[in-house]
Image: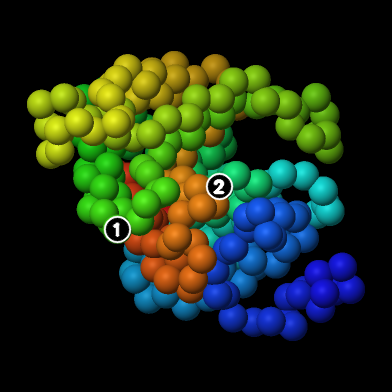
Amino acid sequence: MTATGYLERGSLTTFSGIRFGPDNPWSYREAKRLLRLALDQLRADRRLVRLGMDPSGAGRPAITGREGSAVWDFLPLRYAARAQNFTAYPHLTMGIQSTRVLVIVTVPNGVRAPLRRNLLALGEEGFCGIAMQICGNLVRLFRKANGAKPWVDVCQRHYPTQRSAPIEDARLEFDLRTAVPHGRRRRSGDAVKSQPQWLRATYASLATKRSNLQVGFGAAFSLDCPILHSKQALDYFSGTWLACEPLLKVLFSGNRS
């Protein structure tokens, strides 16, 4: 049915989960369809509207391609309503990849200077403090969601020409729980060990940026996460973005345009 176009947008209009696995191999076309359905329904989430999401704002101008191992789109924030380029503002990003679903608040390379200054003005300790708030929010959210984890994604890339595909120069990805000091662990025997240097490296990269650098805070859901297999996944996707509210408050503090 996918091959004949039956599963294209407009045919099945209700998101009921992401069920890729041994009996249903990942495909770009199906991932694209599921992504559209999920974001269409998330636009109606009033909690996200209160967070600042613009339900009438456009996502990516076009999602092209029929092959690959990932497809992504985003929900814009209302502060970006007059922006000529969506990379001038943070946005709520969702990507369905061949091994996971990534749901993050993206701080793009081209984010407006006042917003970047707000973030860097925290200093390293303040930046880590905001990250700990996000981590705590996500840990509470994922108590019953095996296969979901707080996540940070840092990527440096460059473009040989304006129309060429990006070339990835560096990537740092880590479970945000690595930034939690040993003494603040609530459970003994936690498999995620403390290594706060990853988070500090993220701040250092932002503070001394000399490249096309993008940072995202949010969550990674493995495809075998049971939550993904039902429409309940939407609550966890929106909950992930809501958990990142401390970051958005800092970015837009004193600057609402």
Front tag of 1 and 2: 1
The image quadrant where one finds the C terminus is: bottom left
In this view, the residue farthest toward the front is: 23
Q: Residue 58, position in %: x, y?
A: 62, 65
The image quadrant where one finds the N terminus is: bottom right
Using the rendered view, name the quadrant where residue 133 is placed. top left
- Residue, disc 2: 100
Q: Is mark 1 on a helix, strand or loop?
A: loop
Number of numbered discs? 2
- Residue, disc 1: 144
231 or 119, which lies in front?
Answer: 231
Q: Residue 254, position in %: x, y?
A: 29, 48
Residue 199 seen in this snapshot: yes
Residue at position x 51%, y 66% in the image? 229
Residue at position x 41%, y 39% in the image? 151
188 shown above or below 236:
above
In the rendered structure, which amino acid carries the disc numbered 2?
Arg
Crowd band around label 1 with a 10 angstrom C-alpha radius: few (<14), some (14–19), many (20+): few
